[in-house]
Image: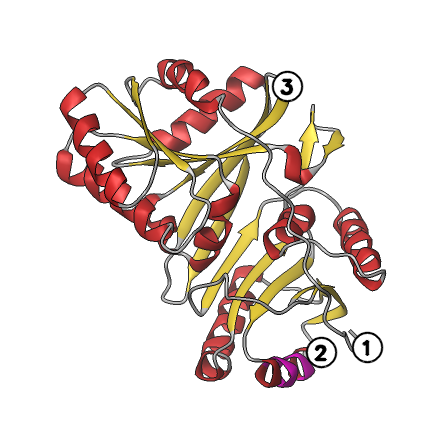
Amino acid sequence: MLYASRSRVDGPIYATLESIRAAALRHNEPVGVHTALLYQAGWFLQWKEGPAEAMRRIMARVATDPRHHQLRVVHSSRGPRLLDGPWSMGMVQSEEPPEALGLRVMQLRDALMKGRQYSPTSVLRRVASPALLGGTRPVEPESYHRVLVCSAQGVDAFELVRWLAERERKRVTHRRYAGAQDLDVATDYLDVEHHDRLLRVVAMARKGLKLPLTRAMLADYSHVVLLLCGEPERDLALLLRVAQACAGMARRPSAVGVGMDLCAHEALAALARRFAIDYLPAAGQPREPARTWEVLQPRLQAWSDPEVVGLPVEPIPSRW
């Protein structure tokens, strides 16, 4: 179940998220309920998975929490788990007014009440991070191209996104995520027009690959770009993190390794084959964003729109 609600919190929002995390781990984890919580533009968005009876009890308690109001369910279905851990949370930098995000919530709510809904990952994208062509015109969330960039060492992934933002004269969106055990992760993204589609380039600290929410969303990425550092142990460890994050996925993103060492690419390709991941070598220097972007272009061309999965709607109490 995914639901959105307006925040009533006046103080620091991250302290509130940490308080909610502590309560959720205390009450939800023992009954098998996993949660991802996002805060943006004055709204909470929660994604919960678990046994039906436990979910009903938790939702009844959530509905009376004074820290939020205007609770609206935007997804309800049965199926296999997508969140493989008890907790993820995030806070998205946003200058849009609460009314703008609320409009997207109500559009999803109206569709749900008419018997149509999107997959959980699609709902999250549609509410939290709409793609805007040229910064103004909305783009269908299923039609844009998503690429995740991680560095084997340092902050080269973030430098690439910053360089792209300067070149495109656009603003980077900053996000902060955390897990059940204080796994604090930075992630930046930028939307750029790329040939005939919109491309979202997401830089994430490599430890973010351990977050349940990252792993749940990973199937929606066409590629994971690995900015190699030239140290075999670190480079292989990064690809191994990607492989672990993709475990159990029917659709896996291709891995693009950017580096100059041919032997390193051969070792990474061999490891990728063990985990059924397509590995694409790119001869570039990760610390030179312009060169990195140049060598990535042909690797990102082979991509097709992901299929939108329709899911049956579960009955929803009218008060939600």
> Where residue 164 sits in the image (x, y, percent)?
49, 21
What amino acid type is highlighted by mark number 1? Answer: Arg
Can residue 128 be seen here? The reply is: yes
Q: Nearer the viewer, mark 3 or mark 1?
A: 3
Q: How many marks?
A: 3
Question: Do the numbered discs 3 and 2 sit on residues whose CB atoms are within 8 Å?
Answer: no
Tell me which secondary structure the magenta stretch mostly adopts: helix
Quarter the N terminus occupies: bottom right
> Where residue 304 sits in the image (x, y, percent)?
56, 30
Question: Within 10 Å of the Cα at label 2, are there few (<14), some (14-19), or many (20+) other Cα atoms?
Answer: some
What amino acid type is highlighted by mark number 3? Answer: Asp
Residue numbers of the magenta segment:
55-60
Can residue 238 be seen here? The reply is: no
Residue at image position (62%, 32%) is 144
The mark found on residue 319 in the picture is 1
Of 203 and 113, nearer the camera is 113
- Find numbered disc 1 in the image and state the secondary structure of the residue it sits on: loop
Question: Within 10 Å of the Cα at label 3, are there few (<14), some (14-19), or many (20+) other Cα atoms?
Answer: few
> Where residue 64 sits in the image (x, y, percent)?
71, 81
Of 193 and 313, nearer the camera is 313
Q: Relative to residue 247, is residue 189 drawn left or right?
A: right
Of 193 and 95, nearer the camera is 193
How far apart are labels 2 and 1 at the CA level? 9 Å
Residue under label 2? 63
